[in-house]
Image (tube, grey):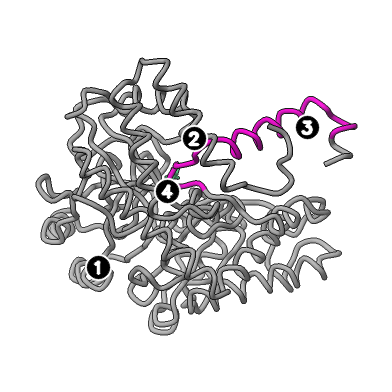
Amino acid sequence: MKTLKNHDPDIYNLIQKETERQNYGLELIASENFTSRAGMEACGSTLTNKYAEGLPGKRYYGGCEFVDQIEDLARERAKKLYNADWVNVQPHSGASANAAVYLALLKPGDTLLGLDLSHGGHLTHGSPVNFSGIQYNAKFYGVDKETGRIDLDSVRDAAKKHKPKLISIGASAYTRDFDYKAFRQIADEAGALLWMDMAHTAGIIAAKLLNDPLPHCHVVTTTTHKTLRGPRGGMILVGKDAENTLGVVAPKSGRTKKWSELFDSGVFPGTQGGPLEHIIAGKAVAYKEALEPDFVVYQQQVLNNAKAMGERFSELGYNLISGGTDNHLILIDLRNKGVTGKQAEEALGQAEITVNKNMVPFDTESPFVTSGIRIGAPAMTTRGLKESDFRTIAELIDRVIQNPTNESTIKQVKQDVHAICERFPLYDFVTTA
Ligand code: DSN
């Protein structure tokens, strides 16, 4: 970044500091990861200069011959990765992908049914502070108080009671897999459409280590930067069966349209303008990487690491929601440890361990304070850590949580954190200490 260093030292220096923060800290936010240098080069390329509203071959601007090929490659690779019939790689984020799906499928006031945010759901699945809860009539299902798992009978009851037009699956803090076939049966019984937001688990699903939503859902959305390990962005997919067996009537023309056409127009012109072709190129790089056999090895290690960390926390007397994990994250209820999620997040931050405070099901604290923390394995697994390292991480976190205001403990843990980070360098261009 020599040019940036000379041209704008303020921004250059702050980027350096952030790179060092990433390199010398334990990154355990479940939704973060480290994308490849190749992907970052694509994202930092001349493609950022190009307007390309529309789709490959059907643009509203000239000069799109190369970005068309890039976006086509991205689409083909994503379809291969998920065995999808159709994909749109233009959403700027997961929230944008979800907005396009809502616009395509619902009218304002229509009812949707999703997982409660405080039980692990997501803001865009109907939270009252988000457009999805403001614009639509959002109803929720939750997890069972005893098991911490989604109880399908209660989902069925909620679907019968509320008669939603759309049922969403997907979560940002749920540690178990989903039974898509059973959800589809519930949706069919209620006359609802079924949508999976697989943002958190997209990489694990691509590696076929979790159930596949595409054969059962009418539409699937995701981000590209979490377990999938690409650049920040979103994507919408339709599975082969969904596309072939279902037709819908578009409200204006009355013509039978494919689902994909509705979602394409939900993205543009519905909710976005020009696509970010530089990011789409970065996504294409990530899909290529995800199609390599090594990616499955990585995802299996993520699962092994999350499990090992969860087991060590349980041995140390921590209360894991649902008792453990099937995926990349664990959710800990800290109430028996006498600290809130906010206190834990702050104390761990001082030791350069980055986690996020998180609501736990049936939480007694506000969303700003919370009773829990969410801890994920994807980012540190990318750096090469294995099960024994994640058990050590659980022990470091425990030391801080037992002594959240003890400066000497925090200092010692920070030294141990740096020692781990030095054993597993992030990017080879990080040169300063
Ligand atoms: N903010 C993301 C997460 O942390 O799960 C979801 O959008």
Task: Tell me which label, 1 or 3, sits earlier in the chain.
Answer: 3
Which quadrant of the structure image shows residue 410? top left
Q: Nearer the viewer, residue 97 or 104?
A: 97
Question: On residue 417, which mark appears?
Answer: 2
Query: What is the span of residues highlighted in magenta in the rendered image?
Result: 5-32
What amino acid type is highlighted by mark number 3? Answer: Tyr
What amino acid type is highlighted by mark number 1? Answer: Asp
CA–CA distance in space, label 3 to label 4: 33 Å
- In the image, is residue 24 part of the stretch drawn in magenta? yes
Q: Nearer the viewer, residue 272 or 195?
A: 195
Q: Position of residue 13 (x, y in %)?
A: 75, 28
Q: Which residue is mark 1?
A: 179
Q: Position of residue 353 (x, y in %)?
A: 46, 33
Ligand 1 resides in the quarter of the picture at top left
**Residue at image x 80%, y 61%?**
61
What amino acid type is highlighted by mark number 4? Answer: Asp
Secondary-structure class at tag 2: helix
CA–CA distance in space, label 1 to label 3: 47 Å
Secondary-structure class at tag 3: helix
Q: Which residue is mark 4?
A: 389
Task: Tell me which label, 4 or 2, sits earlier in the chain.
Answer: 4
**Residue at image x 68%, y 59%?**
282
Q: Position of residue 26 (x, y in %)?
A: 49, 39
Q: Quadrant of the N terminus?
A: top right
Ligand 1 under 8 Å from disc 1 Cβ: no
